[in-house]
Amino acid sequence: MKKDYSEYFKGPSLKDARKRFKEDVHHIDDAYEIPADMAGIGKGKTYFIKTYGCQANERDTEVMSGILETLGYTHDDDLEHADIVLLNTCAVRDNAEEKVFGRIGMLKKIKRENPGMIFGVCGCMAQEEVVVNRIKRKMPQVDLIFGTHNIHRLPQLLKAALLEKETVVEVWSKEGDVIENLPSHRAKDKKAWVNIMYGCNKFCTYCIVPYTRGKERSRLMEDVLREVNDLKDHGYLEVNLLGQNVNSYGKDLDADYDFATLLEEVAKTGIERIRFMTSNPNDFSEGMLRVINEYDNIMPYIHLPLQSGSTAVLKRMNRGYTREEYIELFDKLKELVPNAAVTTDIIVGFPNETEEEFEETLSMFDHCQYDLAYTFIYSPREGTPAATMEDHVTRKEKEDRLQRLNEKVNYYAHKANEKYLGTVQKVLVDGPSRKDPNVLAGYTETNKVVNFKGDPAHIGQIVPVKITEIRTWSLDGEEVE
Ligand code: 5AD
Ligand code: SF4
């Protein structure tokens, strides 16, 4: 079913993006079109996409690559001579944004030497009006700006950019529908990202994502299963089911299934390895725990962002759970899935976080003993509620807290790895390790990186590896027969 999208063309507005409309989301499988005069336009030409941020962006890059290849372009790592360069950006923290602005600056000179290049900025930053205005005012080297909701219109947008002298901007503040049947060029041939839903309705007070990615929209279960089965038929061994909060899967649909149902159905496809991310502790269901425990092909690895160990801070963050509720869930998870590795995300220095509140985060590590944690200093995001909160914590204090937290993280990460010493782990071999081409690297079922001596012919297979040494962030080993 086609729809009139003209109301979407207003340009970026975080205020509009905050709204949640009741109207139904449609699942559309014929929205993607190539204008007749764009067919084959990229023959003999190249593209380069730089991806920042999370897995949702990685997956979007795969789709944009697929679209560009359908137009005839081929991928090339040579950014300076590429005919199309896209920066797929992340808005979650200021330092990610500054990196992008640095790269846009660099491209000014490159474009001068390669004036035929089309240079585009897309992804989450493009959804922010401050960013778009700054680019329009000061960065004429950018030919095209588009957001996260209209990727399927890349052929039309590219056509406009090829014709227009001015920067072409098409950003939809209101999320569109769920678009199926887009081409994609997957980055890997054994492990695949599979979107199960888009957007987020949680509105944690620090987070820009509900604005840049719109309201929660689930894909239909039949579409997800078709994709997983197709991947399996093409030799894929692992799928990672993606959503900002996978626990909400299905709630926006008029359907009698939820994430536990989907997970079970994906498990029944028999694909070797299933992962999922991210789970908000707020609506992690018992049904999910049961399914995780029941199926061997659902990997015992759960990313469960805590953000803060203090109930007062969690309240200011609008996380929807208390310290005690998180502990209860965590303990239940460890009881039902004892071999599970659990990782987390933490923000330190949230507005007016006191020393005592910070210490409550530290003490959560003594309880949960996380396998790993990704730690961040709070970064105010314009347009979010937390950005207007009073904050008397100095930068120095925030940095000091981050360092103290990281010491805890590393201590428990090392401790969690100790139990692997001398064991044999099933490792899906990714390829040569980044540091030493004579060493292979891959992931255990619990998502530990293993660098090991093994047979390069086994790249892309799951092999047994004996763990001979442990490090804080990885394991070393040797392949066994
Ligand atoms: N400042 C710092 N960290 C943030 N995150 C999200 N928004 C912010 C912000 N404004 C972190 C959270 C989230 C992870 C993906 O990024 O910890 O889980
Ligand atoms: Fe951001 Fe919270 Fe949604 Fe995660 S659950 S994307 S932290 S608003």
Image (cartoon, grey):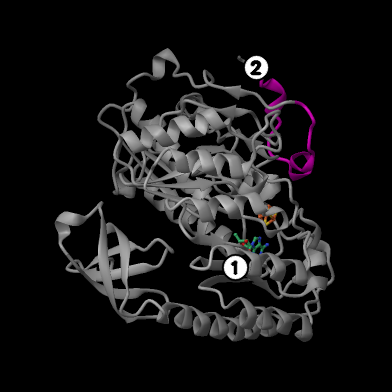
**Relative to 102, is 111 above or below?**
above
Label 1 crowd (10 A; few <14 / some 14-19 / many >=20): few
Q: Is residue 208 magenta?
A: no
Q: Is residue 22 magenta?
A: yes
The x, y position of residue 409, in whole percent, is 54, 79
Disc 1 beta carbon < 8 A from ligand 1?
no
- What residue do we see at 77% from left, 26% from top? 23
In screen coordinates, is 223 left or right of 43?
A: right
Tell me the mark number nearer the camera, choosing from 1 and 2: 1
Q: Nearer the viewer, residue 87 or 244?
A: 244
**Circle 1 sits on which residue?**
335
- What residue do we see at 78% from left, 77% from top? 353
Q: Earlier in the sequence, mark 1 or mark 2?
A: 2
**Circle 2 sits on which residue?**
3
Could you tell me which quadrant the C terminus lies in? bottom left
Q: Nearer the viewer, residue 211 or 165?
A: 211
Look at the numbered disc 2 and give the secondary structure of its residue: loop
Looking at numbered disc 2 in the image, what kind of residue is underneath it?
Lys
In screen coordinates, is 38 left or right of 132?
A: left
Boundaries of the magenta span: 5-23
